[in-house]
Image (spheres, grey):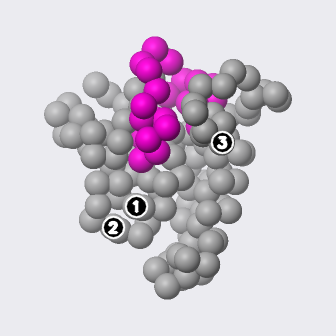
């Protein structure tokens, strides 16, 4: 399966930045090289908010965080979500923005470590995969 477009959840992007040899980092690298990463303003704002949390200060310096945000913003394919966003899908309503971004971005994959998203039933038109499962699928194809 050739993946052309993907949404990557905030938790995966931060995990990739924190641990460069991890499954999240490996799948992010693969997708950066071979696919378009799709963001909405809301998903990018979540990343911006979370990456600046003080708990990451000792792992990611200011320059690294600024560069990460700059580079992702520059390569991203942006989608505009309607307001109101639409149907609720996840047990955690904060996760629905990732579903809506994936739907409007017409992606093949949503890569996440969030159990509320991973537990959703199939049938949305894209796959919801953990970083490890996405990497395994990537390596099979």
Q: Nearer the viewer, residue 128 or 4?
A: 128
* Residue 139 pos. (x, y %): 19, 40
* Crowd rating for badge 3 (residues with CA inside 10 Å; few <14, some 14–19, many 20+): few
Q: Is residue 102 visible?
A: yes
Q: Nearer the viewer, residue 6 or 22?
A: 22
* Crowd rating for badge 1 (residues with CA inside 10 Å; few <14, some 14–19, many 20+): many
Residue named by callout 2:
20
Q: Residue at x 50, y 18 (%)?
A: 124
**How far is disc 1 from disc 2 in space, using C-alphas?**
6 Å
Vertical relation: 19 (above or below) 75: below
- Find the residue positioned furthest to the top: 123
Residue named by callout 1:
16
**How far is disc 1 from disc 3 in space, using C-alphas?**
21 Å
Residue named by callout 3:
94
Magenta extent: 98-124
Residue contact between numbered discs 1 and 2, judged by CB atoms under 8 Å: yes
* Residue 9 pos. (x, y %): 51, 46
> Residue 1 occupies which quadrant of the picture?
top left
């Amino acid at each position: 399966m050739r993946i052309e477009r993907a949404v990557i959840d905030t938790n995966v992007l931060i995990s990739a930045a924190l641990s460069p040899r991890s499954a999240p980092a490996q799948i992010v690298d693969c997708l950066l090289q071979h696919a378009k990463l799709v963001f909405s303003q809301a998903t990018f704002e979540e990343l911006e908010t979370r990456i600046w949390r003080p708990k990451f200060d000792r792992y990611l310096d200011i320059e690294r965080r600024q560069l990460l945000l700059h580079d992702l913003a520059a390569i991203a394919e942006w989608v505009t979500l309607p307001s109101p966003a639409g149907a609720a899908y996840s047990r955690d309503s904060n996760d629905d923005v990732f579903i809506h971004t994936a739907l409007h971005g017409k992606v093949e994959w949503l890569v996440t470590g969030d159990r509320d998203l991973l537990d959703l039933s199939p049938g949305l038109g894209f796959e919801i995969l953990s970083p490890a499962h996405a990497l395994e699928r990537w390596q099979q194809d």
